[in-house]
Amino acid sequence: MSQPPSAPPARRFSRRKFLGLSALTGVGSIAGVSAYAHLLEPEQLSITEKDIQLPNLPDDLDGIRIAQLTDFHYKPEDHKVLADAVASINQITPDIIFLTGDYVDEPSNLAELVSHFEKLHAPYGIYACIGNHDHWKGAPRVLGKALRSVGVRILVNEGTVRRIRDTPVYILATDSIWAGKPDLDKCYANHNGEPVIALVHEPDYFDEFTSKYPLDLQLSGHTHGGQCRIPLVDVAPFSVPYGRNYVYGEFPHPTQQNARLFVSRGLGTTAIRVRFACPPELAVLTLRKS
Ligand SMILES: [Fe+2]
């Protein structure tokens, strides 16, 4: 009796091979995500267009559009994203532009940064506040001179009245909360009942605007939106001091019913140049009388 032909030996997929392949795939995925987060996303400008409801807004100001840029941490490799943001603003033609701090990490990059700002235009001007990095690494006095040289009005613990569509608006800016000496009494020294837009680099200071300091809108940055977020659940695993309660987006004030905060993701990066699920942002906000 002839023996049946023996079956070919089963191809064994050993644990070692499985782990080896998994490791290669994992390494490949990590390398791919890392390359994307380092090389691509920091250059992909996103434009957030959003209505902000402000019940105390005077009728004449209903519909004014403001553009906010923040947290540049400008380096030459950020040229493209900033140039895109400036071109977009000039195409959108907002009424007024606000810059909310952290301009450069190295003073040597300041001249190139302001050469971008020089191209910005808005009929009611460009106003700026100062950030923590501007105290630590950017030399505030040099920064102020450079910004003023291209028509940006920088305010530090100061407020000023700006007439927009012939209606007065009070624009104030604090010093950096983390690295400076914020003083709301000084900020409100010239206030006489006008609607208030406050530029405050660090968002968590929002809660300090008690009833003594009437507020309509605070604009902030500082958090970079977390810089890297977990997709699907949209959570930022890392946070920074003074940016833990309000990381990204629009928030109501805890006690002043009519006041709002908007925190932008900003344009740049600190430490490692990575962004993931948190692209650079130009915020264009239309103020609405609700
Ligand atoms: Fe920053």
Image: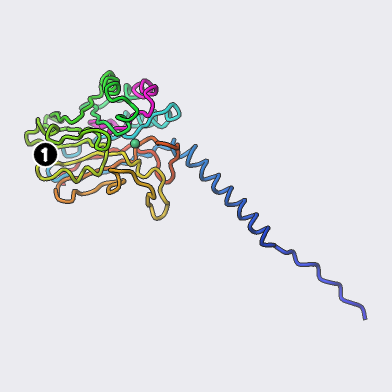
Q: How many marks?
A: 1
Q: Residue lying furthest top in this view?
A: 149
Q: Position of residue 69 (x, y in %)?
A: 31, 34
Q: Position of residue 122 (x, y in %)?
A: 25, 27
Residue on which disc 1 sits: 58
Which type of secondary structure does the marked residue at label 1 adopt?
loop
**Foreground of the two, 120 or 155:** 155
Above or below for 125 versus 229: above
Q: Position of residue 219 (x, y in %)?
A: 24, 39
Q: Quadrant of the N terminus?
A: bottom right
Q: Residue lying furthest left in this view?
A: 192
Horizontally, is 278 left or right of 122 in the view?
right
Which residue does the image show at 31% across and 40% down from the upper left? 264
**Foreground of the two, 51 or 101:** 101
Classed neighbour count for the residue bearing mark 1: other residues with Cα under 10 Å, few (<14), some (14–19), many (≥20): some
Does the magenta portion include 109? yes
Does the magenta portion include 281? no
Q: Residue lying furthest bottom in this view?
A: 1
Horizontally, is 122 left or right of 34 in the view?
left
**Foreground of the two, 268 or 207:** 207
Above or below for 285 versus 236: above
Give the residues in magenta. Answer: 92-115
**The image quadrant in which ligand 1 is located:** top left
Q: Position of residue 168 (x, y in %)?
A: 11, 31
**Foreground of the two, 152 or 97:** 152
Q: Disc 1 marks which amino acid?
A: Pro
